[in-house]
Amino acid sequence: MSEIHLPQDAWEDVEPGTEALLEQWLVKPGDRVTAGQTVAVVVMVKTSIDVPAPQDGVLDQVLIEADATVAQGKPLATLRAA
């Protein structure tokens, strides 16, 4: 099982303690995804950021719901092998 995170480069050039807002999930638990597929959209400092799946698999569990904030390093969801 692996985790889906906001890409690390999204956190560059932001102040420590900055949080992102998970705006929308584009897939739901049980959906198959492919590596690089956008699975969620996050907003940080008035910029929308696409969150890609790190590998092929099935979205297992959403850990951060839409409209919730997420801190750097926190996983958004878990992904299991297909």
Image: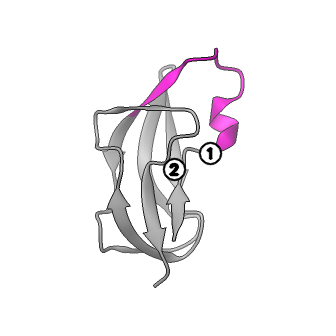
The residue shown at (39%, 68%) is 59
The segment highlighted magenta reads 7-21
Residue 23's quadrant in the figure?
top left
The residue singled out by tag 2 in the image is: 51
User: Is tag 2's residue or tag 1's residue first in the polypeptide sequence?
Assistant: 1
Residue 6: say if magenta: no
**64 w.r.t. 43: above or below:** below
The x and y percentages for residue 4 are: 51, 56
The kind of residue on which mark 2 rests is Val
Image height check: is 9 above or below 78? above
Point 54% across, 49% down: residue? 5
Q: How is the image coloured?
A: one colour
Whether label 2 touches label 1, CB < 8 Å: yes
Find the distance from the CA under tag 2 to the CA under tag 1.
7 Å
Spot occupied by residue 57 in the image (x, y as percentages of width and height)? 48, 77
15 relative to 67 in the view: left or right: right
User: In terms of image quadrants, where is residue 77?
Assistant: bottom left
Picture coordinates of residue 15 (x, y %)?
64, 14
Q: Which residue is drawn at 71% across and 28% down?
A: 12
- Answer whether residue 12 is magenta in the image: yes
Q: Name the residue under label 1.
A: 7
Residue nearest the observer in this picture, 30 or 38? 30
